[in-house]
Image (cartoon, grey):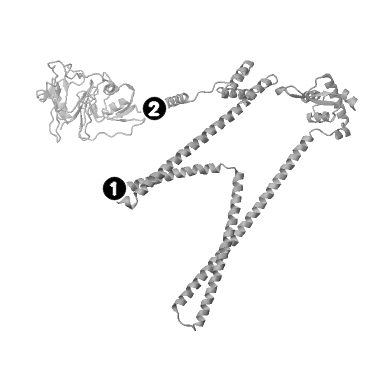
Amino acid sequence: MFLVQYTGLNQLPFDPANNNEPLQFGSASGPLVTEGLIENGGESSKKRKRTNAPSADNSRTLNVDSTAMTLPMSDPTAWATAMNNLGMTPLGIAGQPILPDFDPALGMMTGIPPITPMMPGLGIVPPPIPPDMPVVKEIIHCKSCTLFPPNPNLPPPATRERPPGCKTVFVGGLPENGTEQIIVEVFEQCGEIIAIRKSKKNFCHIRFAEEYMVDKALYLSGYRIRLGSSTDKKDTGRLHVDFAQARDDLYEWECKQRMLAREERHRRRMEEERLRPPSPPPVVHYSDHECSIVAEKLKDDSKFSEAVQTLLTWIERGEVNRRSANNFYSMIQSANSHVRRLVNEKAAHEKDMEEAKEKFKQALSGILIQFEQIVAVYHSASKQKAWDHFTKAQRKNISVWCKQAEEIRNIHNDELMGIRREEEMEMSDDEIEETTETKETEESVSQTEALKEENDSLRWQLDAYRNEVELLKQEQGKAHREDDPNKEQQLKLLQQALQGMQQHLLKVQEEYKRKEAELEKIKDDKLQVEKMLENLKEKESCASRLCASSQDSDYPLEKTLNSSPIKSEREALLVGIISTFLHVHPFGASIEYICSYLHRLDNKICTSDVECLMSRLQHTFKQEMTGVGASLEKRWKFCGFEGLKLT
């Protein structure tokens, strides 16, 4: 059984995980030390050593720099003694034959497992190692010490759970005479060392620059370390490497996580901003030039929506004033002119929809007719005279086809009936109520008439049955009670029929009474509805009269005006002041203008009181409408000189 071999942790000249260059073969820079077959059970194992020789084409030979891995073999006896002191079988003694299964044509060694990526100078990924195969580590030589691998049959050393962002390792089992320089010499092969904290109790903490260097340091766990060639107990020890918790590592890991979270949030924000719809363009400020442009756009159907939005924004901003009121009125009038166009478009679309519905209904009715014909063909084929001539499989297919066609026909028929029902439901509510009331009354009347006729017929039948029973009794009395089984049977049958007729008659009478009660209730409801309609009509007439009276009462009657036009001295003073003010304004003034002048004299003057006072004095003040369109305005004028002549 072949075992996997690992080489020392020399600092690699490149990163094996990122190296994509082809392997370089054909260099004999140094000897290659490999370990071969190791047998279990304490048997002596063999180590074979050979120096790569260049092949015929100077290619396919392994280029490995193993200067730090070579051991001077000038004194093989001392080497064997050192190995025996450590309880290990000496390997690679001089004089042993080199590997016999080396194929010079391939330039590679056969019969051994693939080269592992831990070997320096290689950047290849080996096939997966079987889990049951023990891993054999090799001896690591340093300047001041030597590391001997643990027994491959022993279980791997236990480690604690790896902390997040761990860059610090705990190293225990150091020799008592070990110094910080020796620790650096051993663990600098794993990567760059940032800090070392050494304790007096033969352990230390080492912090590396990167997290992956911790995994390389854990590889050394279980190795026996010996300082120089001494066998003193203080110069030996068994290394135990494990993960260590450090606040600096946790802080850096948290900072990194926060940085990644910030990057993720930034990426999401950029994506949201990219997917966010663009903002609408800002509405320009009002000006005469922009007003003319918007007025032209309002006349264009394609640009109407944009122009209406601009007009709405201007009105909401408060751009309407006395100077621009005419322009805004003209734009509103242009917008109003589109109402008829929109109504016509809606009517055209409704007409198109009705035509499409009618076409769909006609097409659906044609499809239903064809389905009926197909179903009729299936039914005619299912008759006896044609059915007997078909085979069993053909009959089965015909029956399946018939069921499918009937199901599809029923579905389409339900759809057509639904369309017709929707058309019927489009009637107005008043028509529906009237039709339902008339139908209910007609149905109730017809049902009562039918019940009356049925009641009369049942009474006649009952009288006939009674007469027959009396005749049978008389005949039975005349026969001196002679036993006649036929007559007895007839009598029993007649009695049973009579009882059944009586019960049926009682049921009909009860139903007749119930129908009469329902009819009376319907009549009462109808009378109530008629009364409510009359009341509504009266209310409408009263409302119309009130509106007419309110319109008539807008201007007070001449009698009330003539009776008491001025009620107090304050009103007389107001009349004098207003007359003086309006005499200066021959073209009249609005009520707001007049009240603004009066407010300078007294802030408590109300506009409605002033207008009411002026309306009472018709011979002193008169109201006229001036202006056209949006500039239409009510103005009061002083007509006292003319009124004096009239009075």
Amino acid residing under circle 2: Trp
Task: Point out the image quarter for the C terminus.
Answer: top right
Given residues 481 and 632, the one toward you in this image is: 481
Q: Position of residue 599 (x, y in %)?
A: 80, 25
Give the structural element (helix, strand or loop) at label 1. helix
Q: Answer whether labels 2 and 1 touch (C-beta < 8 Å).
A: no
Q: Position of residue 634 (x, y in %)?
A: 77, 25
Q: Quadrant of residue 542?
A: top right
Extreme-front residue of the structure: 385
Direction from residue 21 to residue 558 in the image, left or right: right
Amino acid residing under circle 1: Ala
Task: Read off the residue under disc 1.
Answer: 393
Q: Position of residue 338 (x, y in %)?
A: 60, 26
Task: Point out the image quarter for the N terminus.
Answer: top left
Rendered position, 96 above or below 513: above
Task: Pick whichever of labels 2 and 1 is earlier in the sequence.
Answer: 2
Give the structural element (helix, strand or loop) at label 2. helix
Mark sitting on residue 521 = none
